[in-house]
Amino acid sequence: MMRHKKKNGSKGKKPTGPLNGSLVNRDEVPRIPKTLTDQLQVGFVFRFVTTAQWTGSYTVTYANLLDAWFTAGTATTAYQLFDFVKVKKVVVRAMGAVEGATPILIPQATVGVEFPGLVGGQFGSGKQRIGSGMGYDEPAMVSVSPDKLSQSAQYQPSTANPAFIVRAVDAVRLAIQGAIIDVHVSLKNSGDISPASITSARAGLTPGNLCFGGIDGLAPSTTVARSSFIPAA
């Protein structure tokens, strides 16, 4: 790249201010318009809390994640707000409960995350981690990111293919209600893709509202892990 010489003969950076004393900057010259991004792309963290429907583990799909933030079209129809999702990190926290049994069971909990990557076009490294906690002072916690060079770390469209598996159980492997699941993602849309309808039907929606669904794409009354955000639907 050519450098512009300063008055003293030394080389300096290419000017970026107004051109020849005009009020137009170099990136505003009509014959070389600036490149723009014509799509919405945001980083976001979903937070889910396991419910009475939680069975101890759940396989989250890419469609589930895109269903977790949607816009209402009518009272009974809704559409995904974004077309692609990239999973950056999954964090799970859970606390065990004291079991009234003999022998005495302490409040132990185990949480886990796995990126199975068994589907063509979404191959991962099979990365899997667990974390355990004992007592009331420290919850069980695990934080896992997909390997950067795996396809699990890339943008994926709305499909029924597994994105990751999440687990939260107590000392006797019973499901823990109230575990917190944070899913760190990047979301973006495409002007060439028609908005996809969410998988699970809804009722009583307010047209135009942006709503949050459960980690499985279901409504709050039936989901295995409800959204902590409002409005949840």
Image (tube, rainbow, N blue to C red):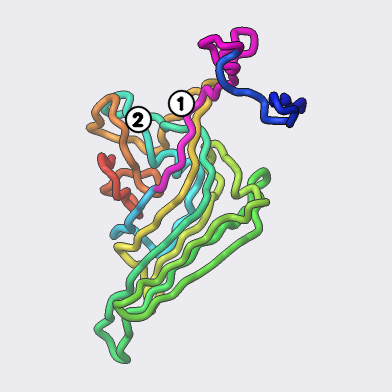
Badge number at residue 155: none
**Nearest the eye: 180 or 58:** 180
In the picture shown, does residue 45 fall above or below 99? above
Q: Which mark is residue 71?
A: 2
* Magenta segment: 20-45
Residue 116 visible at all: yes
Quadrant position of residue 54:
bottom left
Q: As shown in the figure, which amino acid type bears the numbered disc 1?
A: Pro
Residue 43 is situated, as x and y percent measured from the top left of the image, at: 46, 41
The picture places residue 162, in percent across and down from the top left corner, at 54, 50
Task: Using a 10 Å C-alpha cutoff, classify the residue at mark 1 as few (fewer than 14 neighbours), some (14 to 19) or many (20 or more).
Answer: some
Tell how many labels.
Answer: 2
At x 56%, y 46%, the residue is: 161
Would residue 23 be counted in the magenta stretch? yes
* Residue type pointed to by label 2: Thr
Query: Image quadrant of residue 17?
Result: top right
Quadrant holding the N terminus: top right
Badge 2 vs badge 1, beta-carbon distance below 8 Å: yes
Residue nearer the viewer, 233 or 129: 129
